[in-house]
Image (cartoon, rainbow, N blue to C red):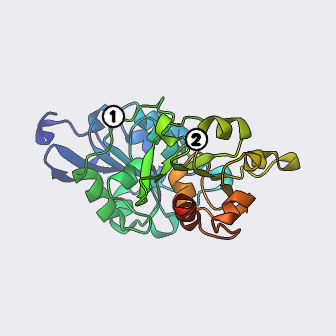
């Protein structure tokens, strides 16, 4: 990348800091992000919804920071975080109560992280962190720029048992690996659909209850002959196995899971360890 000191600065942009070839640039709103921000960490004081995220992503910044604007109906104020994640761009939202809208420099200095996507988390950004610290982490830690938008798993081993079995988080139970069959406990972001669970044949599984559906159709997979449980959809994000594992609360389980000590109301992380430890 070219020397940041030689790269152009558009009107309305303020270069706050430079580390190596990465610039930290503040501006009023998402619509000020332009071609000069390629490779920059760009901070703006407007919402980070899907439409502004789409506009900003075209210019391929290193990372983007915006405001949650109260998150709002259907989460529209921060919906762009996951759009950016699919494109390989770390995204962060500041809590609106702490900042002055249309003042990117104020967001940087006074903002507190309210939400971030997984790529920003990979860079070390945590909810509740001062935005100036989050921006620094985005500048110096390399984001996972090789994210494939077509990756169907985002597979992460989160716990290893002395038996050799693992607890594995993945977006969906529909895409198991051969080594999962009768060996690993899968924590997934999808609901408990019986066909996919039977195909996976895991040592145990935890899915989302998906809001259950009519006649508890979202729980049909609990009838499969594998220890299984689901988490309340209000406690963990659907489509995010890591959220299922770290944040989920068990809302239903089958008798095979109960035999391993899994209980309704239990943290999914605890339930997963009981499953992987069971015989």
Percent position (x, y) of residue 14?
A: 26, 50
Q: Quadrant of the C terminus?
A: bottom right
Q: Nearer the viewer, mark 1 or mark 2?
A: 2
Percent position (x, y) of residue 51?
A: 54, 37
Residue 112 - label: none
Q: Residue at x 41, y 31 (%)?
A: 148
Whether residue 115 sits left or right of residue 24 in the image: it is right
Task: Report the Cα–Cα distance between label 1 and label 2.
Answer: 20 Å
For disc 2, the marked residue is: 172
For label 1, the SS is loop
Tell me if I can see residue 15 in this picture.
no
Whether residue 11 sits left or right of residue 270 in the image: it is left
Q: Is residue 250 above or below residue 18?
A: below
Residue 146 - label: 1
Q: Nearer the viewer, residue 44 or 266?
A: 266
Q: Nearer the viewer, residue 44 or 114?
A: 114
For label 2, the SS is loop
Q: Residue at x 71, y 35 (%)?
A: 195
> Is the residue marked by circle 1 packed among few (<14), some (14-19), or many (20+) residues within 10 Å?
few
Q: Nearer the viewer, residue 230 or 197?
A: 197
Tell me how many marks there are.
Answer: 2
Q: Is residue 131 above or below residue 146?
A: below
Tell me if I can see residue 169 in this picture.
yes
């Amino acid at each position: 990348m070219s020397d940041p000191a030689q790269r152009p600065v558009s009107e309305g942009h303020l270069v706050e800091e430079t580390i190596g070839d990465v610039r930290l640039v503040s501006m009023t709103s998402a619509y000020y992000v332009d071609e000069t921000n390629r490779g920059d960490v760009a901070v703006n004081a407007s919402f980070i919804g899907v439409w502004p995220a789409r506009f900003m992503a075209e210019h391929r910044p290193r990372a983007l920071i915006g405001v949650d604007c109260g998150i709002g109906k259907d989460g529209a104020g921060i919906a762009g975080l996951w759009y950016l994640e699919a494109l390989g761009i770390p995204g962060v939202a500041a809590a609106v109560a702490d900042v002055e809208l249309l003042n990117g420099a104020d967001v940087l200095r006074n903002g507190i992280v309210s939400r971030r996507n997984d790529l920003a988390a990979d860079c070390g950004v945590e909810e509740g962190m001062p935005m100036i610290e989050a921006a620094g982490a985005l500048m110096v830690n390399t984001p996972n720029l090789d994210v494939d938008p077509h990756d169907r798993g985002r597979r992460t081993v989160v716990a290893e048992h002395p038996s050799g079995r693992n607890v594995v988080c993945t977006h969906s139970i529909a895409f198991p690996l051969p080594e999962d069959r009768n060996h690993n406990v899968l924590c997934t972001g999808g609901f408990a659909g019986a066909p996919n669970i039977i195909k996976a044949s895991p040592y145990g599984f935890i899915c989302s209850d998906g809001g259950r559906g009519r006649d508890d159709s979202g729980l049909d997979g609990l009838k499969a002959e594998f220890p299984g449980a689901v988490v309340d959809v209000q406690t963990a994000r659907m489509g995010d196995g890591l959220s299922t594992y770290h944040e989920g609360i068990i809302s239903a389980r089958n008798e095979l899971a109960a035999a391993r000590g899994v209980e309704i109301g239990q943290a999914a992380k605890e339930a997963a360890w009981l499953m992987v430890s069971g015989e």
